[in-house]
Amino acid sequence: MYSISQVAEMVGIPTVILRAWENRYAALSPNRIWLSNVLRN
């Protein structure tokens, strides 16, 4: 599994574009892995 930054680097576009496609067009369907340290306040 690749991170969004790794995919962006592979295809040569900024991560912001991939995130926009994900939100606007449902073009991507990522599997998200949440780490416990990310969820802490």
Image (spheres, rainbow, N blue to C red):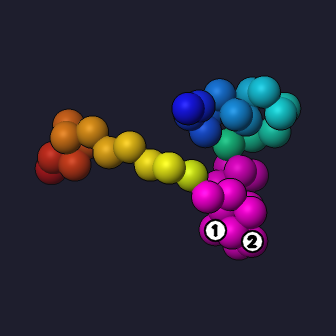
Q: Is residue 39 above or below residue 7?
A: below
In this rendering, would 32 be left or right of 39? Answer: right
Tag 1 near tag 2, CB within 8 Å: yes
Span of residues in magenta: 16-29
Residue with the most extreme right position: 12
In this rendering, would 24 be left or right of 34? Answer: right
Q: Which mark is residue 23?
A: 1
Amino acid type of the residue tagged 2 in the rendering: Tyr
Q: Position of residue 24 (x, y in %)?
A: 71, 72
Q: Does dot 2 land on a helix, a strand or a loop? A: helix
Whether residue 20 can be seen here: no
- Residue at image position (75%, 40%) is 14
Q: Alpha-carbon neighbours of circle 1 within 10 Å: few (<14), some, or many (≥20)? A: few
Whether residue 36 can be seen here: yes
Residue with the most extreme bottom position: 24
Q: Alpha-carbon neighbours of circle 2 within 10 Å: few (<14), some, or many (≥20)? A: few
Snapshot quadrant of residue 26? bottom right
Q: Position of residue 41 (x, y in %)?
A: 15, 50
Q: Does the magenta stretch include residue 27?
A: yes
Snapshot quadrant of residue 11? top right
Q: Does dot 1 land on a helix, a strand or a loop? A: helix
- Residue at image position (81%, 39%) is 13
Q: Position of residue 4 (x, y in %)?
A: 61, 39
Q: Residue 9 carries which label?
A: none
Q: Mark 2 points at which residue?
A: 25
Magenta-colored segment: predominant secondary structure: helix
Q: Is residue 3 magenta?
A: no
* Quarter in which the N terminus is drawn: top right
- Residue at image position (65%, 28%) is 6
